[in-house]
C-alpha cells in the first residue's frame, strides 16, 4: 500500500474513532443526567473512559480521563475537578499498564475498572459524607453508593466490546507481507 495513502487512511480513521468516542462519552453523560431518579444510574463515563484508555496512548488516555471526570462532576453536582483528577490518574495508569504489561482482555479491564470505580466511590464518600460525620453515612454507602458501583462495573462489559470493535474497525492499518520462495538464492 502506498505510504501516503496509508497515512491519509490512518488520519481519517483516527478522526472518525475520536468522534465516535466523544459521542459515546456525550451519550453516557446525557443518560446519566436524564435517567429516572428512582433507579440507581451507573456512572457510565467511568467505564467508557477506562475502555478508551485501554486502546489509546497514555497522553490521550489522560486527557480522556480528565474530560470524563469533569463530565462526571457536572452530572453528580459535585466539586468540579475532583473526579477529573481521579479519572485522569486512573486512565493514565490503565493505559500504561495495557501499553507495557497487560493484554487487552475483558478480565483485565473489569479488574482495572473495578479499581477505578472503588477509588472514585470511596473518595466521593469520604469527602462528602464521612469527613463531615453525616448521619446515616453507612446507610448511604450500602444502599446508594455500592449499588451504583456494582451497576457501573456491570456496564463495562458491553462498553468493552463496543470500544474493541471501534478500535478494530478504525484503528491502525496493519499490513502483512507474504514472502515468496525463490530458487535464485545461492547457498554455499
Image: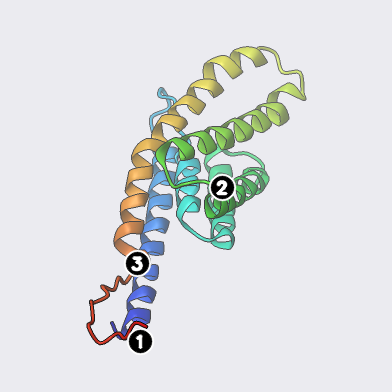
State the SS at label 3.
helix
Q: Nearer the viewer, mark 3 or mark 2?
A: 2
Question: Which residue lies at the image location 57% right of the left edge and 53% below the top edge?
Answer: 100
Q: How is the image coloured?
A: rainbow
Question: Which residue lies at the image location 40% right of the left edge and 24% below the top edge?
Answer: 39
Mark toward the start of the polypeptide (2 vs 1): 1
Question: Which residue lies at the image location 68% right of the left edge and 32% below the top edge?
Answer: 123
Mark toward the start of the polypeptide (3 vs 1): 1
Quadrant in which residue 168 is drawn: bottom left
Left or right: residue 46 compared with residue 182: right
- The residue identified by callout 2 is 94
State the SS at label 1.
helix
Q: Nearer the viewer, residue 85 or 116?
A: 116
- The residue identified by callout 3 is 16
Left or right: residue 120 compared with residue 144: right
Measured from the top left, where is residue 162 in percent x and y? Answer: 32, 48
Q: Nearer the viewer, residue 22 or 34?
A: 22
Quadrant in which residue 112 is drawn: top right
Question: Which residue lies at the image location 69% right of the left edge and 24% below the top edge?
Answer: 129
Give above or below for 109 relative to 147. below
- The residue identified by callout 1 is 4
Q: Residues within 10 Å of mark 3 (few under 14, many from 20)?
A: some
Q: Nearer the viewer, mark 3 or mark 1?
A: 1
Mark toward the start of the polypeptide (3 vs 2): 3
Q: Work out how far the residue at label 3 is from the one at label 2, CA to CA, in angstroms.
A: 23 Å
Left or right: residue 185 compared with residue 83: left
Q: Residues within 10 Å of mark 1 (few under 14, many from 20)?
A: few
Give above or below for 167 relative to 127. below
Q: Nearer the viewer, residue 51 or 183?
A: 183
State the SS at label 2.
helix
Amino acid at each position: 500500500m502506498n505510504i501516503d495513502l496509508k497515512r491519509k487512511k490512518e488520519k481519517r480513521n483516527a478522526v472518525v474513532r475520536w468522534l465516535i468516542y466523544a459521542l459515546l462519552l456525550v451519550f453516557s453523560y446525557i443518560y446519566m443526567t436524564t435517567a429516572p431518579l428512582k433507579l440507581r444510574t451507573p456512572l457510565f463515563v467511568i467505564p467508557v473512559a477506562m475502555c478508551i484508555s485501554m486502546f489509546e496512548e497514555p497522553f490521550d488516555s489522560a486527557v480522556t480521563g480528565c474530560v470524563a471526570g469533569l463530565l462526571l462532576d457536572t452530572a453528580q453536582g459535585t466539586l468540579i475537578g475532583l473526579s477529573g483528577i481521579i479519572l485522569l490518574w486512573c486512565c493514565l495508569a490503565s493505559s500504561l499498564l495495557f501499553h507495557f504489561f497487560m493484554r487487552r482482555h475483558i478480565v483485565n479491564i473489569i479488574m482495572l475498572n473495578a479499581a477505578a470505580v472503588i477509588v472514585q466511590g470511596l473518595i466521593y464518600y469520604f469527602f462528602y459524607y464521612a469527613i463531615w460525620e453525616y448521619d446515616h453515612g453507612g446507610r448511604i454507602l450500602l444502599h446508594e453508593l455500592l449499588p451504583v458501583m456494582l451497576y457501573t462495573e456491570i456496564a463495562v462489559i458491553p462498553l468493552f466490546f463496543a470500544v474493541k470493535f471501534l478500535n478494530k474497525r478504525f484503528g491502525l492499518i496493519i499490513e502483512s507481507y507474504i514472502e515468496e520462495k525463490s530458487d535464485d538464492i545461492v547457498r554455499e
